[in-house]
Amino acid sequence: MKKILSIALLLALMVSLLAGCSSGAATTAAPAATTAAPAAGETTAAPAAGDAGIYALIVKNTGNPYNEKEAEGFTKAVEEFGGKVIVKRPANPTAEDQIAMINELVSQKVSAIAIAANDVDALQPACEKAAAAGIKVISLDSALNPASRLTHVQQADPVAIGRVLVEAAFDMAGGSGEFAILSATSTATNQNTWIANMEKLLKEDAKYKDLKLVKTAYGDDLRDKSVSETEALLQTYPDLKVIVAPTTVGIAAAAKVVTDKGLVGKVKVTGLGLPSEMAAYMTADGACPYMFLWNPIDIGYLAGFTAKAMVEGATGALGDKIAAGALGSREVVTATSGDGGTEVVLGDPFKFDTANIGEWSKVY
Ligand code: RAM
């Protein structure tokens, strides 16, 4: 065990050294294992010399390692350009908790707020109050409506995400039969956009006519609720062939339940997962044959630099240029979600399978 651990640490060190040497490729010089999530509340990082302002990140909720990776990238960016960082973690994945945090940050007179929105519209009054106080508000990962934000930092084209998830369900079901979705909260902008794109594709493309979406359940990005929702799906739909969970909390919970109940092979699990949490289920005889994600550290990192650009005078208008540190230069484009606002896009969804999961699970 000790030997395995030290090999893992050595590998992690090599990865971080290599990442440090490569110029501008990625920001994933990351620790070997998932760090335990801090409790709900606030953490701050000390300002560097030549303080460039206070940059706040509000994640969806506490207790989700994906959110900690996002925070890691955001903190890295802000420290790189010499700002002070505040990370806020709501106790619950709700708009109410995030509104209270936005109000606190207005009192703290921060320069910018980046927020992974728990509700597309409900945060608008609080965001408007922040904007009126001169605070630059952007969203990342899960969008605010265009009236609440200057721009949005988008992980990947939501139409492409919807397409890869439907195609995975089709493939794993053998072309026909029942599948279910296990989502996060019912108000999460990102999950709702992906699910809407999945439903549209299922309706419009005859290829999927024999694939039946029987139910969309909500585990609220809480582990226990995701487990009980998975159990209910398995009980209500005994012929279920696939569970698609477009949330890192949901997919890990679904894979655990399917494994514990001895249903591996009968019910397949796919969706959007964090490699470090899913590696155990992505073996030759595991519950999850393959899944997708993007780099959550890079999403936070890109949001940090996007917030900086807004503080320095960009407005989130089409064509604005974002100097994004190790990620290079990005441009503000029309939102791929079609919500009428603008966004900055990170990249394409990446496929993780049994061949590459071992390597990626050490990175995030
Ligand atoms: C969860 C969160 C997050 C989402 C990922 C895929 O961690 O809901 O918003 O982007 O899953």
Image: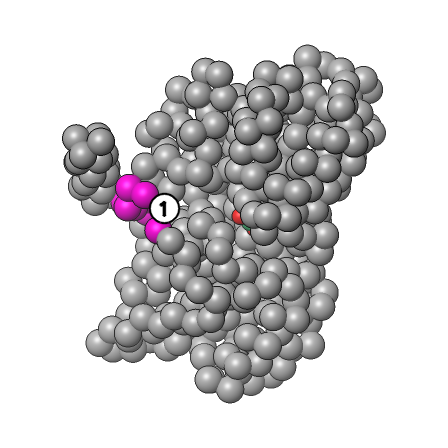
Which quadrant would residue 210 be assigned to in this image? top right
Q: How many marks?
A: 1
Specify the amino acid type for callout 1: Thr
The answer to which quarter of the image holds residue 177 is: top right
Q: Which residues are magenta?
A: 25-35
Q: Would residue 184 be visible to someone looking at this image?
A: no
User: Residue 147: x, y in percent?
Assistant: 68, 68
Secondary structure of the magenta portion, mostly? loop
Residue ID at (66%, 67%): 95
Q: Position of residue 65 (x, y in %)?
A: 44, 50
Q: Position of residue 345 (x, y in %)?
A: 52, 47
Figure check: 342 above or below 242: below
Image position of 192 with respect to 123: above or below: above
In screen coordinates, is 11 left or right of 358? left
Q: Is residue 12 visible?
A: yes
Residue 184 % position (x, y): 64, 48
**Position of 44 compared to 286: left or right?**
left
Give the SS element for disc 1.
Answer: loop
At 50% from the left and 60% from the top, the residue drawn is 62
In this view, the residue in front, 224 or 337, is 224
Q: Confirm whether the magenta stretch covers residue 34.
A: yes
Left or right position of 170 against 256: right
Extreme residue in the top direction: 174
Within 10 angstroms of label 1, few (less than 14), some, or many (20 or more) residues? Answer: some
109 in magenta: no
Residue sitting nearer the eye, 324 or 360:
360
Q: Quadrant of the N terminus?
A: top left
User: Which residue, given by chain and number where applicable, does mark 1 sit on?
Assistant: 34
